[in-house]
Image (cartoon, rainbow, N blue to C red):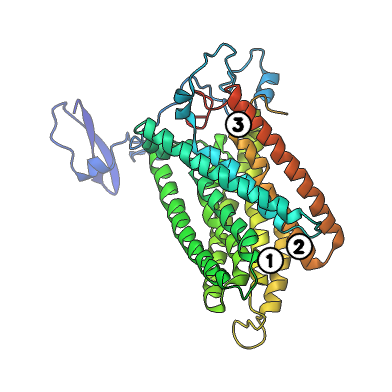
Amino acid sequence: MAGGCSYLVRDNRFSQTTTPAASAPLNDRQAYFPEQPNSNGYPMDVKGKQPYTDSSQSTQPTPNETPRDSIDLEKQDDKTDTAPHDPHKKDPNQPKLPWGKRLLHFTWAWYTLTMSTGGIATLIAVQPHRFPGLLSIGAVFYVVNLIFFVVLCATMALRFIKFPGSFKESIMHEREALFISTFFLSVATIITGTQKYVVEMYEAAHPVRGWIVTSMGVAFWIYVFLTFCLAVFQYSFLFARHTYLLVKFMPSWLLPVFPVMLAGTIASVIGTDQPIGARMPILVAGLACQGLGFTLSILMYAHYIGRLMQVGYPNREHRGAMFIGVGPPSFTCLAFIGMANALPDDFDLQRDGLLDGNLLRTLALVSAVFLWVLHSRPEYFHLGWWAMVFPNTGFIIATINIGSSLKDETILYVANGLTIAIVLMWAFVLYHNVRAVVVADIMYPGRDEDVED
């Protein structure tokens, strides 16, 4: 040590004595009070007056990033004379790449296509006012969704095989890894679609229906286990490995818990056809998972509102993804009503006639109505645009469930109109998705979710 001072205790006060440069090792009191003393001889408290730094984690800065890359660039442009750096700006002279190289940038976010298409299929199946051929239209969406899902899985497998190490990179990436959840959300829509277009097509006494219903129950429990593990381990990994700034909060941070939350939605769809012995555990697990996801979403909404208040809207290329925030209250709403309706008619929790099925259905309806009311055109397409479809399908299904419970035809007709609007939105986003692939707005280096943002 180059030099120092020591403190002696005299009459309950500290006095300072200087020590030579080559002094003996510090004693316990010197090590505990290393700061300079104040005018009264006491060591000064500098705790909390220096910025906290944590060297245990290392962060990698985003290449070519300015401090406001994810902030509303239009707002920034109004306050500055120079154009801000926009990392999403496409280079008009970017070279053409062969499809083999572009395959490296086929990310997990592509499963937003199948989760949205599956959501449309489920939405059509629950329409309150039907016409001949409506279920056939829904069945077409269900089959198309299955085809999309198989194609996406094959393409993802081809990417991981063609580029060794890309699978590990994708599940560890700070941005792309968040979209792993869209794979499981697609599985959730396939399960609910199977219930609507396969299970319910068979008569109750049909011999095939029995084992299909059992298979749906098994699929539910496998789904709950995998999605719960995904939420726990992915959040744990992200907390330990990456550092996210709250001023860059995006609703995609909710995605890891989204699949396990939709276990409640699955339970509300398949619960009615399950045998009583298997139905109650499914409903209880679905309620627990729905509560877990919704509670975590509420906590994150606080950060989301703070981010919007502090730095404004996200970059216009990502504003479509803001609809992800519609999902948790909407799916919780429809899950509450669906699970309450799936309760047996003679259900009585305490066997005292107080907390019976009718009361729980009323409470579910009141809670659903409460949740129901909580909730510039981009230049380039991003897969986050599909968030304008999938969460809103949950909102419309919740509207249908509320209208059916209240027996209000006005709400049900509004839901019909919203259904038409969301189907048109699905077609709009699908067109821009295909166009973006053709003109290399996506599946191109620096243009997808496999880069930091």
User: What residue type is disc 3 on?
Assistant: His
Marks 3/1: CA–CA distance: 34 Å
53 relative to 336 in the view: left or right? left
Please give the residue where the numbered disc 3 appears in the rendered image: 382
Instruction: Examine the rendered structure and indicate whether residue 279 appears above or below residue 102.
Output: below
Marks 2/1: CA–CA distance: 8 Å
Please report contact status of discs 3 and 1: CB closer than 8 Å, yes or no: no
In this rendering, the count of numbered labels is: 3
Please report contact status of discs 2 and 1: CB closer than 8 Å, yes or no: yes
Residue 135 in percent (x, y) is at 72, 56
Q: Quadrant of residue 157?
A: top left
Please give the residue where the numbered disc 2 appears in the rendered image: 402
User: What residue type is disc 2 on?
Assistant: Ile
Q: Residue at x 84, y 55 (%)?
A: 413
Residue 252 in percent (x, y) is at 56, 41
Please give the residue where the numbered disc 1 appears in the rendered image: 337
Marks 3/2: CA–CA distance: 33 Å
The answer, for residue 177, to whether it is visible in the render is no
First in sequence, mark 2 or 1: give its number. Answer: 1
Instruction: Examine the rendered structure and indicate whether residue 114 appears above or below residue 273.
Output: above
Mark 3 neighbour density, 10 Å: few (under 14) some (14–19) many (20 or more) = many
